[in-house]
């Protein structure tokens, strides 16, 4: 899918449209051509909202990762479809599955205060891509991802993007042992109920800091 007209999407947090992504990738190419090791920089595109196939190819070639504000799909997906981009171009919003299939690393974020920083809800939104205004409408169903992929996107992949994978992001010897205990396994419940899973305990650096 390719819609040739590129959009500079201005928001509270900067440029999010496909033209802005072109600009970021041009800058990354210039850095690479200047001899900068992009792998060491771990360049990422924050929000990475409207994304074309050719841009995904460029991201893969440059080693640029993505961070998706997945709440755009859930809370504003119908507005993106009806008021901002139109039905066809709205399908290019937060293309988690496409970047995963291309071998590009990615994360999910809330852009708090824009949406609540609830990892379980972000996982559900990425897995179902249901919209808040029309719960039966799934925006770009081919961009849904597995629960396992969504969990990685808010844990180990987030740690990697921040250069903190030696400290947090997974449970391994020598790391900080930041973790939560849940009352249900997110992989074994109905996807539409992931956000309702209760947190029983929260541990930070191997110490319990919350018990529900």
Image (cartoon, helix red, strand yellow):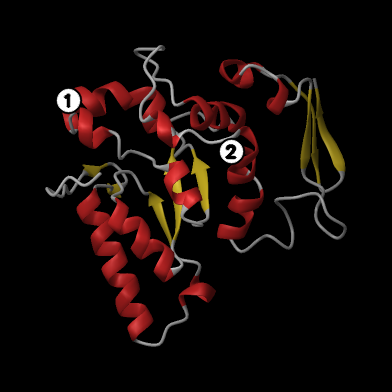
Residue 94 is left or right of residue 52, and the answer is right
Residue 25 locus on image (x, y percent): 31, 65
Q: Nearer the viewer, mark 2 or mark 1?
A: 2
What element does badge 2 sit on? helix
The N terminus - image quarter: top left
* Residue positioned 49% across, 50% down in the render: 101
Q: Which residue is mark 1?
A: 83
Residue 64 is left or right of residue 156, and the answer is left
Lower sequence index among marks 2 and 1? 1
Mark 1: give few (<14), some (14-19) or many (20+) Cα within 10 Å.
Answer: few
Q: How many marks?
A: 2
Find residue 165 and name its label.
Answer: none
Residue 196 locus on image (x, y percent): 64, 16
* Residue positioned 72% across, 22% down in the render: 188
Please say if 133 is above or below 28: above
Snapshot quadrant of residue 75: top left
The C terminus - image quarter: top right
Residue 75 in view of the camera: yes
Contact (Cβ within 8 Å) of mark 2 with mark 1: no
Residue 199 is left or right of residue 140, and the answer is right
Please say if 180 is above or below 33: above
Q: CA distance from mark 2 to mark 1?
A: 28 Å
What element does badge 1 sit on? helix
Residue 66 locus on image (x, y percent): 44, 53
Q: Which residue is mark 2?
A: 150
Residue 133 is left or right of residue 143, and the answer is left
Residue 198 locus on image (x, y percent): 72, 19
Q: Residue furthest bottom?
A: 35
Mark 2: give few (<14), some (14-19) or many (20+) Cα within 10 Å.
Answer: many
Residue 114 in view of the camera: no
């Amino acid at each position: 899918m390719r819609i040739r007209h590129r959009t500079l999407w201005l928001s509270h947090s900067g440029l999010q449209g496909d033209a802005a992504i072109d600009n970021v990738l041009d800058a990354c190419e210039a850095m690479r051509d200047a001899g900068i090791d992009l792998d060491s920089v771990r360049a990422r595109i924050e929000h990475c909202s409207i994304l074309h196939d050719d841009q995904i190819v460029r991201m893969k070639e440059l080693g640029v990762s993505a961070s998706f504000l997945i709440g755009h799909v859930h809370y504003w997906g119908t507005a993106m479809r009806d008021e901002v981009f139109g039905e066809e171009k709205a399908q290019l919003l937060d293309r988690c599955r496409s970047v995963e299939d291309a071998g590009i690393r990615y994360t999910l974020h809330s852009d708090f205060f824009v949406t609540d920083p609830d990892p379980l809800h972000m996982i559900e939104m990425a897995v179902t891509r249901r919209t808040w205004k029309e719960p039966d409408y799934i925006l770009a169903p081919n961009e849904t991802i597995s629960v396992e992929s969504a969990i990685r996107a808010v844990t180990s992949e987030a740690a990697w993007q921040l250069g903190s994978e030696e400290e947090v992001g997974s449970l391994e010897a020598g790391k900080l042992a930041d973790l939560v205990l849940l009352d249900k396994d997110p992989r074994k419940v109905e996807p539409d109920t992931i956000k309702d899973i209760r947190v029983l305990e929260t541990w930070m650096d191997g110490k319990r800091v919350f018990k529900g």
